[in-house]
Amino acid sequence: MRLACSLPALTAVLAVASATACTPPDPATVTPSADPTAVTNVIEITVPPPIRTPQPVTIDALEAYVEPESRFSLNVPSGWVGAAQAPSEQSDIVLGMVFQAPGGDGLLSVTHFDNGRAPSSVGATANAVLRDVSGWMQQPGYREVGRETVLERPGEALRMEIVYERNSGVPMHSLVLFQIDGTVFSMVNVAVEESSWPANQGLIRDVLGSYRVPAGPTGAAP
C-alpha cells in the first residue's frame, strides 16, 4: 500500500476529524508590519488554547447508520450528529465521516484509505497512520494502553486503546479499529473524555463490532 509514501499529504484531509479528536486548530497569530507585503521582521505570537472543564458523555443506546453510498455501516450512539468530510484528490483518503456527541466530549470518526492495492499488513499500516496522520502521538499525555486482535478477522483487523489529552486540557480515552477490506483500509475511532470511559466502554466496543465494509445487514442495530 502506498500509505508510507503519501501519509504526510493526508494530514490536511483529516483536519476536521483530527481537530475534534486530538489536534487543536491553528493558533492565533499576530504579525506586526508597517508594510503588509513585507517578508522580514515578522513576529509570531502564539496564543495557547483555553483550559476548560471536561464535558461527560453518556451513551444510552445505538442506532443503525448506513453511509449514503453503502460504503460502510455501523451502529452510532443515539443522538450523535454526523458530518461528511471532503476527500483529497492528492491523498489515499477517499472517505471521511465524523459523528459528535451533542453537549459532551465524545467523537466517532470513520476514515477510508484506498490506493487500489490491498495493504500487506494491518499492523504496519496502522502504525504508519498512527505516526504520520492521526496526530495522537503529538498530543500531551499520549499513551498506548494496548492492542487486541479481532478474533473474527485474524490478520485483517486490530483494535488499539489509547489515552491522550487535548490542548484544551480535556483527557480523552479512545478505542480505534484498523481494518482491511480488499483495497480499503479503515480507521474507526470512538473517543470520550476519560471519566466517561468506564461506563461507556461496553457500548463503544459494540460500535466497533458492528462496523462493516461495504455496508451490510450485520451493521444494523439489534
Image (tube, rainbow, N blue to C red):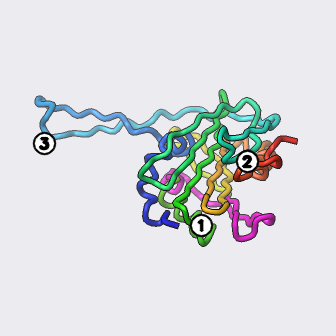
Question: For the residue marked with disc 3, what is the amino acid?
Answer: Thr
Please, what secondary structure does the residue beneath circle 1 have?
loop
Tell us which disc is closer to us: 1 or 3: 1
Q: Which numbered disc flags the more N-terminal residue, 2 or 3?
A: 3
Looking at the picture, does residue 127 appear above or below residue 16?
A: below
Q: Which residue is mark 3?
A: 40
Q: Which residue is mark 2?
A: 215
Give the crowd class for mark 1: few <14, some 14-19, many >=20 residues within 10 Å: some
How far apart, in angstroms, are the residues tagged by discs 2 and 3? 54 Å
**CB within 8 Å, label 2 to label 3:** no
Q: Which numbered disc flags the more N-terminal residue, 1 or 3?
A: 3
How far apart, in angstroms, are the residues tagged by discs 1 and 2? 19 Å
| Residue 68 image position (x, y, % from top left) | 66, 38
**Magenta-drawn segment:** 135-160
Q: Residue at x 41, y 54 (%)?
A: 9
Question: Quarter holding the C terminus?
Answer: top right
| Residue 113 image position (x, y, % from top left) | 55, 55
Q: Which residue is mark 1?
A: 118
Looking at the picture, does residue 217 appear above or below residue 38?
A: below
